[in-house]
Image (cartoon, rainbow, N blue to C red):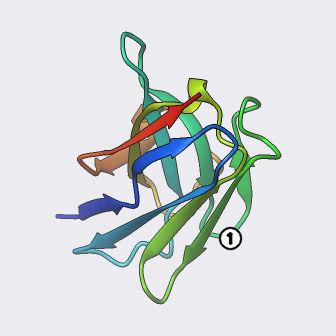
Amino acid sequence: QVQVVESGGGLVQAGASLILDCIASGRTVSSYSMGWFRQAPGKEREFIAGITFSLMPYYQDSVKGRFIISRDNVKNTVSLRMNNLKTEDTAVYYCAVGRTAYSGPGQREDDFDAWGQGTQVTVSS
């Protein structure tokens, strides 16, 4: 069973940067995509960034150019650097591990089968 733990959330001002980290344990995840989702108050959880087993990053349009996803397959970690944060980025951010090894860039929740508890990111104006 895979355990996923996020860290790095917090309260920042608009325009600031923040790095979220995620570590997976219980399975070597180097063969799986990893992704970040977020859920804002009153909204559904949405995909924002992912990185395939072959290290190809992909993003939701609203964060493209501001967020950078990376992974360390030795440490079983994935990070999300968030630059130029906006108030609309306020949400609980979730890390997830892909369901199928060697798969392409999935963006649906069903493409992932191990989730962290989430970390809160609050951006003030």
- Taking the image as drawn, is residue 106 in sight? no
The answer to which of 114 and 47 lies nearer the viewer is: 47
Which element carries disc 1, helix, strand or loop?
A: loop
- Taking the image as drawn, is residue 15 in sight? yes
The answer to which of 87 and 7 lies nearer the viewer is: 87
- Horizontal side, residue 76 vs residue 26: left or right: right
The answer to which of 122 and 119 lies nearer the viewer is: 122
Q: Please tell me which residue is depicted at 43% across the width and 22% down the height of the picture.
A: 40
Q: Which quarter of the image is occupied by the C terminus?
A: top right
Q: Position of residue 16 (x, y in %)?
A: 65, 49
Q: Which quarter of the image is occupied by the N terminus?
A: bottom left
Q: Quadrant of residue 27?
A: bottom left
Q: Position of residue 22 (x, y in %)?
A: 40, 65
Q: Amino acid at mark 1?
A: Ser
| 25 versus 38 height, above or below | below
Q: Please tell me which residue is depicted at 39% across the width and 49% down the height of the picture.
A: 10
| 40 versus 110 height, above or below | above
| Residue that lies at the very extreme toward the top in this rendered image | 42
| 107 versus 113 height, above or below | above
- Horizontal side, residue 54 vs residue 48: left or right: right
Q: Quadrant of residue 81?
A: bottom right
| Residue that lies at the very extreme toward the left in this rendered image | 1
